Image: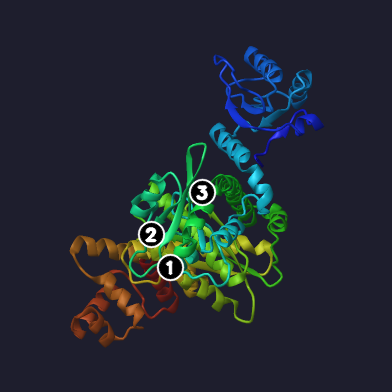
Amino acid sequence: MQADLVHANPTPENLGHPVSDVLMYDPLDSWSSVDDRIILAVGCTYGSPDFNQLLHRAANSNAAAVIVKAHGARMEELRSAAVLHSLAVLVAPDHADWTRLVALARASVMGAAADSVSGVRLGDLYAFANAAASITNGAASIVDPLGRILGYSTLPGQPIDELRRITTLTLQETTQPAFDQDFKVVYAAPGAVVVPAADDGMARLALAVRAGGELLGSIWIIDPGDEKRATALNALDRMAPLAGLHMLHARSASDFGERRNADLIRTLMDDTPHASFAAAQLGLDAASGLAVAAFSIVRPETVSLESVREIHRLLHLVTTVCNVQFTTSHSALIGSVVYALLPCQGSSPRAAHGRILHEIEAYAHTISSFPVIATVGGIAQSIDGLPRSRSQATQTLQHLLNQEARGASAPRVALYEDFQIPLNLLKIGEFIADNGLAGADQIAKIQAHDAAQQTDYLNTLRAYLATNGNISAIAAQLHVHNNTVRYRVTRLAEDFNLDLADPQKRLWLWLRVTTMDLAAT
């Protein structure tokens, strides 16, 4: 089952006990047939009357094993109880989901014999898709209930259509199964069915995959043609139990893998003392440098179910594109941002990083109707430099998100150096504000005067600084007469004590106006 179970009494006899089915324990039920069953002891704790009664009845009824949760009991105590009753006792983690354990156990029982013949490693859905494609003579895709492509075949010579090409690249169906009539037909059918071709596409054979009554997803095969269709449908029906077993294992491994990746990548970027350990766990090679990429979706609300689905689709898209470009990918969803570690290969790594961003942006419409923002921080020459690269990526990402939210005309993909100057100026603006350096200086007084008197002195000063004091250029920018500009500049100097001939004062005024404008965009 690969479910992180601990065996409390691993004797050769116990390990060799055949298993026929799975039973949820209820102390009020009468046991009619328990032989060779695995019993899940839901709600039973070590030392309780129900626990002792369960082990006694299971041992006397030739049960295959009992699965329990420790809930504070020591392994020595559980092992002693197992030995006392000559019974296999499997200890599940306290946080394990009983419904998941039931589904895993039942799928294991149903699929074990078939799996021993198939030679496909449990949970390897790409290898399983290749096996299915070979048996049915049609290109295969495995899809979960959210429309994510969990695996697809890569056998040469099998025809595919444009829909198959797009979905394997984005790892996502173009229409969610919940809103697709073909998926609804497949889910309602008791076995494999033929799905007619749509538009210029190809017909398909499809099978809903379930375990213990739970819908795990579906298998889709490009129709192999009239002569082979009946045999392929029959083969699909026969592989249903094994497909369920593989999908359950893949789901457990995927959940664990995503969490592990996220934890290790977070350690790399946030926990410098332990970063080298995390790098070793991920197998990272930082010899040529690494850069952190950050991706986010611009949504008005970020806590809906659909927003969660879309950010996971973005994670899969980023993972796929990075795998294609670099043959390896280290990516994770942390909070509402997808991060990826990009290697710095070749003579122009930043060009490769830019291509990654643009390719992901090009396919963003397949995962969400909202824009995707993508950025890459600077190159870190060692593992220790990754926090800085991550900070640069997120600063650039936040800057572009702010501009997008305000409707400003700005790119949606960028390298850090593309916006390094405005980002540095924003830091200067934050320093000025945090240290109270602005106080009630001339800029504050001009703002107050403009607000009270409905004047336009701040815009005049802004244009003056931007044009190096060119009166004609200022007049053109403000759409006023040259004499009006001269009058306003005179009033600025006299009423607000501005010495615009002093370069240091001009620099300070420019910094104040520029950082203020950047913070507002």
Work out whether residue 176 or residue 288 is closer to the camera in this orientation and state it: 176
Q: Is residue 516 found left or right of 125 in the rendered image? A: left
Which mark is drawn over residue 272?
A: none
Q: Is residue 53 found left or right of 453 in the rendered image? A: right
- Residue 519 visible at all: no
- Residue 517 visible at all: yes
Residue 278 appears at what percent x and percent y? 69, 54
Work out whether residue 296 or residue 435 is closer to the camera in this orientation and state it: 296
Quadrant of the image occupied by residue 73? top right
Quadrant of the image occupied by residue 248? top right
Under mark 3, the amino acid is Asp
- Disc 2 crowd rating (10 Å Cα; few below 14, some 14-19, many 20+) is some
Residue under label 2: 298
Quadrant of the image occupied by residue 22? top right
Residue under label 3: 237
Give the structural element (helix, strand or loop) at label 1: loop
The answer to the question of whether label 3 and label 2 lie on touching residues, with beta carbons closer than 8 A, is no
Work out whether residue 499 or residue 482 is closer to the camera in this orientation and state it: 482
Earlier sequence position, callout 3 versus callout 2: 3
Residue 201 appears at what percent x and percent y? 38, 68
Which residue: 59% across, 56% down?
A: 128
Q: Quadrant of the N terminus?
A: top right
Eye-nearest disc, 1 or 2 = 1
Residue under label 1: 363
Eye-nearest disc, 3 or 2 = 3
Residue 349 appears at what percent x and percent y? 60, 77
Give the structural element (helix, strand or loop) at label 3: helix
Residue 98 appears at what percent x and percent y? 56, 32
Which residue: 25% across, 81% down?
A: 477
Asked if residue 8 is positioned above or below residue 159 in the image, the reply reads above
